[in-house]
Structures are given as structure tokens and as C-alpha cells.
């Protein structure tokens, strides 16, 4: 049989657990527990705002649309640079530590709070496209209605049957130590097959 003193210990224990349960929402505002992985997201979506129907067969005079997105999950506010670049099949791509040496065609600058997401549209078109035997030259690309002279030449890819180019996007983050944007190691890309207009 339990004595009154034994019941008192049980009541105190249950009372403390109840207080902690009721106070936990307030405590979460004051006490920061270690979170999960800290990261930034970068994505590209097709014209229907889905991960499908990306432009692939492109031609001179066509207008193309995709959506770029960035998500901040770093635990604090962050300033981002989103750089759009263009390459032929032989130009180097960025890797996890070194950005591409291709020139920046267009750049978005975005400030995001923790857990905030940004999305923007990216339109592009091509002009001064010349086919000469097994070579294709793209003289100009327009990104968000701003023209850039390229003179990018690629050769026919026998294995994949096409003239391949790549539109790609690199993610840059503000580095407080260097007081400038630094390449984040993240990039997304679209393979494009240049074809004759229909």
C-alpha cells in the first residue's frame, strides 16, 4: 500500500512533466536545439511549373521559358547570386568547388530569410544560328530580353544525333569573410539540341 509521501512524488513528477509540455512551445522560441542539415536549394522547373516539359529541341526565333528557384535552409538570412551561363559541349562545366569559366549572361540577386523560397522566370531565345555541315554556330542568345554575343560553335554528336549546348545556372552565396559572393558548389542545367526551324 502506498503512503501519502509516495503519492506526493508521483504528483510532483506528473506536474513537472505537464508544465514542460505546456511550456515547450515557448521554450522553442528561446532555446535553439541543434537542427538538421543546413543547406541551400537550387532548382529549375519547366514552363508548366513542373519538373517536366523542359525545352530541349530549340531553334532560332523560338522563345523558351523555365523557372528558377532558390530555397534557404541555412538557419539564418542569406544573400544569393544566381548566375546564368551558356556552354557548348566542349566547354567545362562547374564542379562542386570550382565555378565554370563561361561568362555570366544574366544574374539574379536574392536576399532570403531562413526557410524562405524565391522563384523567378528565365526566358531565352537564339538568333544568328548557322548550320554548316557538321557544325552549328550560335551567334547570340537573349536571356530575359537582354542579348549577348556568343559565337559558340559545336559539332554534330553522332552518338546522340544532335548539336548540343547547355544552359546552366550556378548558385553563389555571400561570404562575410571575403565580403563578396562565393560559389556554393551547386548548379543545375538544361541540355539543348539546336535544330533547324520548322
Image (cartoon, rainbow, N blue to C red):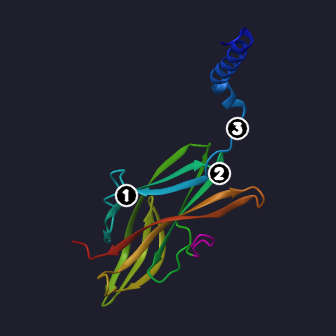
Residue that sits furthest to the top in the current view: 4
Camera-side residue of 123 and 191: 191
Q: Label 1's element?
A: strand
Q: Residue at x 31, y 65 (%)?
A: 62
**Do callouts 3 and 2 mark residues in contact (Cβ within 8 Å)?**
no
Q: Is residue 139 above or below residue 155?
A: above
**How far is mark 2 from mark 1, CA to CA?**
25 Å
Quick one: label 2, few (<14), some, or many (20+) residues within 10 Å? some
State the CA–CA distance, disc 3 to disc 2. Answer: 23 Å
Q: Which residues are magenta?
A: 95-101
Please indicate whether residue 50 sits to the left or right of residue 173 in the image: left
Decide whether the magenta segment is chiefly helix, strand or loop.
Answer: loop
Q: Residues within 10 Å of mark 3 (few under 14, many from 20)?
A: few
Depth order, front residue of 88/175: 175
Give percent across and percent down for residue 20.
67, 24
Which residue matches tag 1? 65
Return the residue found at the far right: 177
Q: Position of residue 55 (x, y in %)?
A: 33, 64
Q: Which labelled disc corresponds to residue 165?
A: none
Instruction: Give me the residue at 53% from left, 79% from top.
Output: 92
Which residue is the site of mark 3? 32
Q: Residue 58's quadrant in the figure? A: bottom left
Nearer the camera: disc 1 or disc 3: 3
**Badge 3 element:** loop
Cα–Cα span, label 1 and label 3: 41 Å
Disc 2 target residue:
79
Amino acid at each position: 500500500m502506498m503512503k501519502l509521501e509516495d503519492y506526493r512524488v508521483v504528483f510532483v513528477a506528473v506536474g513537472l512533466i505537464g508544465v514542460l509540455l505546456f511550456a515547450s512551445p515557448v521554450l522553442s522560441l528561446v532555446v535553439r536545439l541543434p537542427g538538421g542539415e543546413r543547406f541551400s536549394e537550387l532548382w529549375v522547373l519547366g514552363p508548366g511549373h513542373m519538373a517536366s516539359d523542359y525545352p530541349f529541341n530549340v531553334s532560332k526565333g523560338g522563345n523558351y521559358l523555365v523557372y528558377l528557384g532558390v530555397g534557404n535552409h541555412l538557419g539564418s538570412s542569406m544573400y544569393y547570386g544566381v548566375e546564368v551561363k551558356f556552354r557548348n559541349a566542349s566547354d567545362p562545366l562547374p564542379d562542386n568547388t570550382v565555378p565554370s569559366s563561361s561568362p555570366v549572361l544574366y544574374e539574379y540577386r536574392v536576399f532570403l530569410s531562413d526557410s524562405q523560397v524565391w522563384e523567378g522566370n528565365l526566358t531565352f531565345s537564339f538568333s544568328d544560328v548557322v548550320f554548316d555541315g557538321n557544325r552549328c554556330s550560335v551567334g547570340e542568345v537573349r536571356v530575359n530580353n537582354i542579348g549577348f554575343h556568343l559565337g559558340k560553335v559545336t559539332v554534330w554528336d553522332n552518338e546522340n544525333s544532335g548539336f548540343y549546348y547547355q544552359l546552366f545556372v550556378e548558385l553563389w552565396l555571400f561570404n562575410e569573410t571575403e565580403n563578396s559572393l562565393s560559389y556554393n558548389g551547386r548548379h543545375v542545367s538544361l541540355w539543348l539540341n539546336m535544330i533547324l526551324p520548322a
